[in-house]
Image: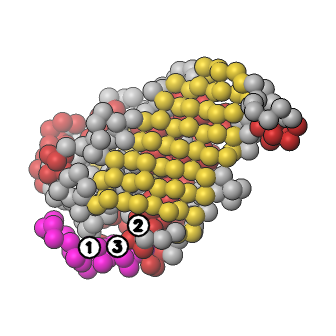
């Protein structure tokens, strides 16, 4: 197979980021061939930036039916990701979706089913999985070095956003345009990594503040508590209203504690497992001897273009195991964020898998009562259109 012809749906900031490194030849065996966007100016800008040879289409439907591309990167507002993905698979195209894969799991299952039926390669842009620190953290937890997990806590409050950020786009920070706030815009990467590291919880209790720090209708401050099948617990805290904020992940297990912060990993390793120490220690006070180790992380290239390169390699070899993240995995982090919102709306515990119909119904209620004028059809959530 020659170079893979790439079309990008969404000629805004995310789409142009991907177009930039592809057009510069930074992804082997990939050629930027086309853009689709509902904004004519975006298309004019794309041709001016990347050349008149770039074909442009004023809808995703036209691009995927054009025959001009072999694969598409979907970089539109969130609601559009699944339906565009479905149409692309139906036309025999390979698909790479920007995060999140969608707004609600009921919709995302449709694109997963379309991917399965098509036999084409389906990726999701979870570029944070390529960071050396995260790869090492995953390796440590999978290796069993920490023993059975007991507790984890992720403090992710460095996603500060000013009001001007939300004012830039009418679709942002609205239930009808974006479908959520910090959980759906800023935190899909952390939620993906969280489940990648520790697995999915079995139940969630979340407290979400809606427009606590900004003039928006969606959540900008979240504190959530989860429980896992083995009895372990976890906490996830995020906000776009704290400065300077922090990004720190801690996991405690039978053999000690691991902390990931500022690109570094520290392992406080028990010489004797806590459960064994608890059963055999006879002196009352005391705790296991432990050693503090700075874990070498290593290097290597990371970022969006690594995800895209692996997607291209998977397409050429017809081997989805080469993907950084299979698109079907995107539903996992979305299920967590849906569960957190559902818990906050119901003011109660929520078990996973969630009641998808209940979540979808409550989401539509939020859209229907929205006071924000975003010029979107509030009755047809799945048909919402937008542009970066």
Magenta stretch encompasses residue 265: no
Callouts 3 and 1 close, C-beta under 8 Å: yes
* Cα distance between the residues tagged 2 and 1: 16 Å
Q: Secondary structure at mark 3?
A: helix
Q: Which residues are magenta?
A: 359-382
> Which residue was labeled with disc 2?
344
Which mark identifies residue 214? Answer: none
Counting residues from the start of the chain, the first of labels 3 and 2 encountered is: 2
- Residue 153 coordinates in the image, percent (x, y): 53, 44
124 relative position to 183: left or right: right
Position of 111 relative to 21 (above/below): below
Q: Which mark is residue 363?
A: 3
Q: Which residue is mark 1?
A: 367
- Crowding at dot 3, Cα within 10 Å, few <14 / some 14-19 / many 20+, comes out as many
Judge the density around disc 1: few (<14), some (14-19), many (≥20) Cα neighbours within 10 Å. many
Residue at 18% x, 36% y: name it.
49
């Amino acid at each position: 197979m020659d170079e893979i012809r790439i079309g990008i749906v969404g000629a805004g900031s995310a789409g142009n980021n991907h177009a930039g490194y592809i057009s510069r030849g930074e992804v082997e065996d990939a050629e930027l061939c086309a853009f689709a966007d509902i904004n004519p100016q975006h298309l004019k800008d794309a041709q001016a930036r990347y050349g008149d040879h770039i074909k442009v289409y004023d809808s995703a439907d036209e691009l995927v039916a054009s025959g001009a591309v072999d694969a598409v990167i979907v970089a539109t507002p969130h609601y559009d990701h699944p339906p565009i993905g479905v149409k692309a698979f139906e036309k025999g195209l390979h698909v790479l979706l920007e995060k999140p894969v969608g707004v609600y799991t009921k919709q995302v299952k449709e694109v997963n089913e379309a991917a399965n039926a098509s036999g084409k390669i389906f990726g999701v842009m979870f570029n944070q999985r390529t960071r050396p620190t995260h790869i090492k953290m995953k390796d440590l937890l999978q290796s069993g070095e920490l023993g059975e997990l007991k507790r984890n806590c992720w403090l992710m409050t460095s996603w500060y956003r000013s009001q001007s950020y939300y004012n830039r786009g009418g679709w942002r920070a609205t239930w009808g345009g974006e479908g959520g706030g910090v959980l759906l815009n800023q935190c899909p990467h952390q939620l993906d990594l969280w489940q990648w590291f520790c697995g999915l919880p079995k139940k969630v209790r979340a407290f979400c503040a809606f427009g606590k720090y900004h003039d928006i209708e969606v959540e900008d401050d979240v504190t959530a508590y989860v429980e896992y099948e083995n009895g372990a617990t976890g906490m996830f805290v995020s906000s776009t209203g704290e400065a300077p904020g922090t990004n720190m992940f801690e996991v405690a297990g039978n053999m000690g504690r691991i902390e990931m912060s500022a690109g570094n990993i520290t392992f406080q390793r028990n010489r004797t497992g806590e459960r064994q120490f608890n059963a055999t220690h006879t002196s009352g006070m005391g705790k296991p001897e432990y050693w503090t180790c700075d874990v070498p992380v290593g290097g290597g290239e990371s970022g969006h273009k690594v995800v895209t390169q692996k997607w291209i390699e998977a397409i050429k070899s017809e081997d989805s195991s080469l993907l950084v993240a299979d698109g079907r995995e995107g539903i996992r982090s979305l299920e967590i964020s849906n569960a957190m919102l559902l818990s906050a709306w119901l003011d109660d515990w929520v078990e996973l898998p969630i009641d998808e119909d209940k979540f979808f119904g409550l989401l539509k209620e939020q859209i229907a009562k929205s006071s924000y004028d975003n010029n979107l059809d509030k009755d047809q959530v799945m048909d919402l259109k937008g542009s970066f």
